[in-house]
Amino acid sequence: MKVILMQDVKKLGKKGEVVETTEGYGRNYLLPKNLAKEANAASLNQAKQDKATAEHRAAQRKDEAIVLAAQLKKVTVNMKIKIGSNGKMFGSIASKDVAEALIEQTKLEGIDRRKIEIKEQIKGPGVYKAVAKLHPDISSEFTVQVEEE
């Protein structure tokens, strides 16, 4: 029996794939739980269209990430920190702080705060490198300049 998966099914396939299953597994498990629908001519055409649309959207997201990466390479994020009389920094600067400063200073859309990582720990004033993962295949390195307040 051929079915089109509506959700990812472990050991069977991913959403949108057309797979061959046994009659009992398809009729008694996949169809009642809305994990799949029966593959007939109309649903196969719809699945092909959905797949083409998904591929087009993925290509668009990748193109946008390439453009954003080119813009980020030119960016320097300026941050000010308080330093005590002993020359030590109050608190620390995390990737979340760098992400917020980056978004605030550049006004760029499409940057995920959770996907920014600092290459080395920020321990005081200086110039540091950070990486923004914009797409599974694309990342961009930018500069973080930390100055004393």
Image (cartoon, rainbow, N blue to C red):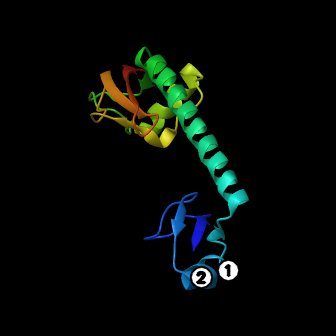
Q: Position of residue 134 (x, y in %)?
A: 46, 34
Which residue has dot 1 on it?
Answer: 32
Foreground pick, 1 / 114? 1
Q: Position of residue 74 (x, y in %)?
A: 43, 14
Residue at position x 52%, y 80% in the image:
22
Quarter holding the N terminus is bottom right
Quarter holding the C terminus is top left
**Most extreme residue toward the front, as rendered?**
41
User: Are the residues tagged 1 and 2 within 8 Å (C-beta)?
Assistant: yes
Q: Position of residue 49 (x, y in %)?
A: 66, 46
Residue at position x 28%, y 32% in the image:
123
Foreground pick, 51 / 109? 51
**Most extreme residue toward the right, as rendered?**
42
In this view, 17 is above or below 95: below
In this view, 79 is above or below 48: above
Give the left or right position of residue 103, taking residue 132 as reference: right
Residue 31 shows up from this direction:
yes
Give the left or right position of residue 22, taking residue 34 as reference: left
**SS type, badge 1:** loop
Which residue has dot 2 on it?
Answer: 29
Foreground pick, 142 / 59? 59
- The amino acid type of the residue labelled 2 equals Tyr
Q: CA distance from mark 1 to mark 2?
A: 6 Å
Residue at position x 64%, y 41% in the image:
53
- The amino acid type of the residue labelled 1 equals Pro
Q: Position of residue 59 (x, y in %)?
A: 53, 33
**SS type, badge 2:** helix
In which quadrant of the rendered view does residue 15 lie?
Answer: bottom right
In which quadrant of the rendered view does residue 133 lie?
Answer: top left
